[in-house]
Image (cartoon, rainbow, N blue to C red):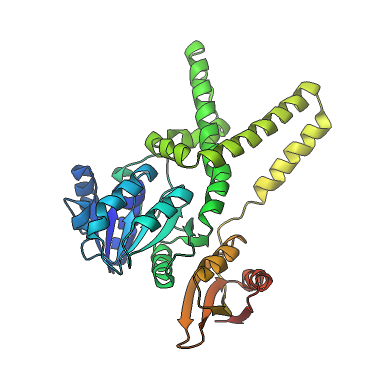
Amino acid sequence: MKVAIIGSGLIGGSVGLKLMSSGDHQVVVYDRDPEAAGRAVAIGAATRSASTAAEAIDGSEVVFLATPVGALEPLVRELRGSLLPGQVLTDVGSTKSRVVVEIEESIPEGVNFVGGHPMAGKEDHGIEAADGSLFDGAWWILTPTSATDHAAYRLVHSLVTTLGARVMALTPQEHDELLALISHVPQITATALMTQAAERGREHAGLLALAAGGFRDVTRVAASNPEIWLDVCRENRDSIVLALRAFTERLSAIGDLIEAGDREQLGLLFAEGRRARRSLPGKQVAGDLFAVRMPIPDRPGVLAEVTTTVGNLGVNIEDLEISHEAEGGRGALMLAINGRVDADRAAEALDRRGYQAKVELI
């Protein structure tokens, strides 16, 4: 398979390294910085570099748009005349609602787009930070819509699992609301703490030298690429503002408890935080694969509804197959899910949606 990667930074470079290591893909990279693209080839993240984005996507089956969110829509407009029917685009941006709508509306007929966001990264950025194991065991969110082509979704899903990631499907709106809480607010919090400490450090030179593991852990992401976060704050403004307001209200309430010396309520709060932190899901342990099978109506939006229903459970779909009946406007969908418990949970949720889901061992 020929894969094009537009953008040879941390994410694009890591995608290229993993695909190249499999030996099954030809990877062509383009970057607005020719030196970065050349370095991607030198470290084995691409077969060759292209001098333009249009040259990179020529003949490709899948195109990874690995640029900052703010550059995505202009990039797709630039490529519009070079895209051909059957090509599949996917991105790695950390905001989705506006991006997905605009790209779906701007691509030519027959070209397909599947929104994506790998939940992996480092505080370092650029091609020098690329790592072929970056996505191993990490979640990769896909954001299908009623316009998402079934075959295109399965192709992107397959490539993402090749990268070592686990797939979760969410609607673009769900993605942005959830990421505001678990990614964007933590980034802003880390930045606020780090800048406050830096200001105090100018008065007390030894302050930052005293920063222990806890402070370093909490502020690690403050070292992330600022360009990315400027785009995120613009694109996901509403969800971030709502999440920040809820968070500041919670901080204010905690401050009131401290001021009042309410040891009992503070103790309950710390215990609740400890329990919640310890209950965070760990890495999935491989087990038996189970098939969740169901008949489906052959209409737009079914794939998005089914996969996001399962995604809202936090369940990884290992693989999926869709078959269409020649007559009758119906088809069948099979989801491969690791472990009987998760397969049963998925089937029950789909039953509540009106699908007749059955579980069997593969």
Residue 184: x %, y % from top left? 52, 40
Residue 249: x %, y % from top left? 68, 32
Q: Classify residue 3 by image quadrant.
A: bottom left
311 lies left or right of 123:
right
Along the line of sight, which residue is nearer the eye, 204 or 110? 110
Residue at point 43%, 56% (across, down): 116
- Please say if 39 is above or below 145: above
Q: Classify residue 100 by image quadrant.
A: bottom left
Along the line of sight, which residue is nearer the eye, 58 or 43? 58
Q: Most extreme residue toward the top, as rendered?
A: 203
Residue at point 72%, 26% (across, down): 255
253 lies left or right of 210:
right
- Please say if 96 is above or below 264: below
Q: How many numbered marks have been drawn onto this rendered protein structure?
A: 0
Residue at point 63%, 76% (across, down): 355
Along the line of sight, which residue is nearer the eye, 43 or 76? 76
Residue 300: x %, y % from top left? 49, 70
Residue 61: x %, y % from top left? 29, 67
Residue 295 at least partly seen: yes
Q: Most extreme residue toward the bottom, as rendered?
A: 327
- Please say if 215 is above or below 152: above
Q: Quadrant of the C terminus?
A: bottom right
Q: Quadrant of the N terminus?
A: bottom left
Residue 135 at least partly seen: no
Q: Most extreme residue toward the left, as rendered?
A: 51
